[in-house]
Image (tube, grey):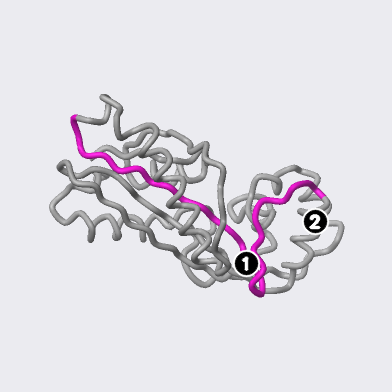
Amino acid sequence: MKYVLASASPRRQELLTQAGFTFDVIPSAIEEKITKDIPSDVVMELAHQKALDVFESQILHNPKYQSENCLVIGADTIVSYRGEILGKPADKEEAFDMLSMLADRTHQVYTGVSFIGQIRGQKIAHTFYEKTDVTFYPVSKQDLHTYVDSGDSLDKAGAYGIQGAFAIHVKGIEGDYNNVVGLPIARLYHELDSMLPKEKVHYAF
């Protein structure tokens, strides 16, 4: 089985590598279009758009992938607080405002995952999402400014990375930690395993 990750995220690449997947990286260049309102629907819609874009534009008619079974994996992560969707902040000011709102509260992290490809000449498509609750300790304005000024918040949904410096402010999580990092790798493996019962999902061990 050949896998293609439709994302440039180093965190998603790391999670797939740690799980033993062998894959190519072809980031989607599609302009994201959101037509949904519910966070779980939004991430599934965006993940599907990314996977479909790469499959149709880079894989479907590419001789490199014609001789083997191939799946494109797309993913998208958002943070939601009281129904408000928080994507990547536009600047440091917006990052500070996001983190100020999330401090001393519980929010939700949603990751949508979609895989699209060809198995024995047949097209396969499947999309799902995972949700994790994350609670922060109270965070001082000084600590918020220090983190935001580091620049780490600008490329992350909700303006923070749980695997980085902001981890010192995480009081607890309920659900999959890797989902917050950007890819629910265990759920992905088992979804693939259930969808492809006669295929080797990967050769990790």
Q: What amino acid is found at the position of numbered circle 1 in the picture?
A: Ser
Crowd rating for badge 1 (residues with CA inside 10 Å; few <14, some 14–19, many 20+): many
Front: mark 2 or 1: 1
Q: In the rendered image, which residue does mark 1 sit on?
A: 80
Horizontal and vertical percent position of residue 47? 46, 52
Q: Residue at x 41, y 38 (%)?
A: 54
Q: The residue tagged with tag 2: helix, strand or loop? A: helix
User: On screen, 198 above or below 120?
Assistant: below
Magenta region includes residue 81: yes
Q: Nearer the viewer, residue 6 or 150?
A: 6
Give the answer, above or below, for where 68 lies relative to 99: above
Identity of the residue furthest to the right in this view:
142
Magenta segment? 67-92
Residue 46's disc is none
161 sits left or right of 116 in the view: right
Question: Which mark, by number, is residue 96?
Answer: 2
